[in-house]
Image (spheres, rainbow, N blue to C red):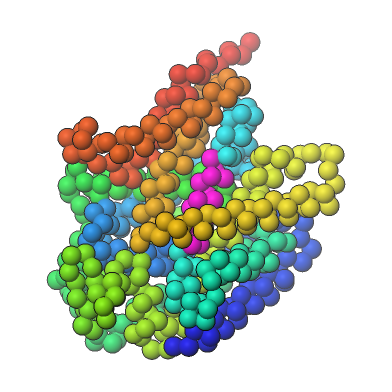
Amino acid sequence: MSPLLLFAFVIGYFLLLLGVAYRTSRNSDNDSFFIGNRNSNWMLVAFGMIGTSLSGVTFVSVPGTVGDFAGESHKAFNYYQVVIGYFIGYFLIAFILLPLYYRLQLTSIYNYLQTRFGKIAYKTGSLFFIISRTIGATARLYLVINVLQIFILDDIGVPFFITAVVILIMILLYTFEGGVKTIVYTDTLQTTFMLLGMVICIAYIMHHLHFSFSSTMHSLNQKGYTQLLNTDMKSKGFFLKQIIGGMFITIGMTGLDQEMMQKNISVKKLKDSQKNMISFSVTLLIVNFLFLLLGGLLYIYALSNNATYDNHQLLMNGKNIIGDDIFPNIALHYLPKAIAIIFIIGLISALFPSADGALTALTSSFCIDMLGIKRNPNLSEQQKKRIRMTVHFSFALAFLFCILIFKWINNKSIINIILDLAGYTYGPLLGLFGFGIFSKRSLPETWLTTAICLLAPGICYVLSKNSSSWFNGYQIGYELLLIDGMLTYLGLLIISKKPIAAN
């Protein structure tokens, strides 16, 4: 299919987003940018959050894990073990963290750490969010940009660097003014296109293979693609590790993440925000199952079209398309033109929600938590807006730098990188918030707090690299985040002081 035609659809889609942004950002102020004036519709937030949570990683990488038996922790439907953990984690967020955030009327969730422990803990928590979200968002963004580059822009001679710059400029243009107020609407639109793209691809492949739902599941089962539970206790993919790890990944990457919570606390009432979280968690169970179903169908489709599987390689016309490469290769080279267009629209719909929300949340966190502009009486609204826009642009540059690093690394399964890195970067946040919620002790106003939050991931890295030899073959999987959080909690406990008794 003509790369220019596909590129025209990308541009047309962006113009649609720009139109939505223009309409929703009129009369916006700094509160609109940061928390949507606390007037967002909970149903729109819930639906839009699906796109933010799934991103291009789920759209491209999750289907690829189904037949990629080289990755021990992602074999067949094993990824669904993590999804079950996500589901449990969302309920904990809804009934433990959200009431806390609403009671304190937070704009930045890291203000809780200041209220509880003081300025240094507050700055430390915000710093770890900035690091975590920057890495996670740019990894997701890189995956989609790389697919667009390989399958469209390489053919028309556009360098990867230019592609990355142009896409970041696109995101800047429609988030610059409205922030959260705009993103609530653009994410809803994009989630719709992404899910439609996935459902249409499933329906077409099932129709092409003459499969019903029951015959699809039977065929997947025969190939070994529906294996759900990993019962090997020493394996990284052991089901209890995956479920517990998924639960704490959700608490860290959603409940302690300014980007995700920024949208939730933009809803007026706590009960509506909890409705959002619960409905969102149920929907994610269904959507992730459908992406795994799509992955199994893609592998069956490839094998029915003379692909060969050998030594962890799926060769189709001499090219290895296993993992992240299978969906874009089949959609753009082997399916009808209409499906290729739907795939591209679905792909870029998966790209923007994770990037635009991250850019907005990072700007909000840096402006509020690091620079303190919201409570600075010496700054006018116009000066605050100028600072916000400068920070927004600066983070776009940081995104570009990280995307280029991921291009240099060029890993075949980005989802592994994202979830592994989450264990290191969100663990200290889990420890900080956990210590605040479950302990009444106070922390000294020193940089020891920051030092402990930096030391815990370092210890985790050493444990992860040596766990197999030190612990009789036991391999640390996604429970790494919990271990990181517990080490942080223990370190904070050591330096903490008893609360001063009230007179």
Evaluate whether residue 310 shows in this view: yes
Residue farthest toward the left in the current orientation of the protein: 222
* Residues rendered magenta in the picture: 128-142
171 to the left or right of 315: right
Task: Give coordinates of residue 318: x percent, y percent.
Answer: 26, 78
Task: Give coordinates of residue 50: x percent, y percent.
Answer: 48, 62
- Comparing 124 with 156, the one in front is 156
59 to the left or right of 433: left
Residue at the (18%, 65%) spot, across then down = 311
Based on the picture, tell me whether residue 136 belongs to the magenta stretch: yes
337 to the left or right of 202: right
Magenta: main secondary structure equals: helix
195 up-or-down from 271: above or below: below
- Comparing 475 with 502, the one in front is 475
- Residue 45: which quarter of the image? bottom right
121 to the left or right of 199: right
Number of numbered discs: 0
Based on the picture, tell me whether residue 77 belongs to the magenta stretch: no
Quarter in which the C terminus is drawn:
top right
Residue at the (79%, 53%) spot, across then down = 386
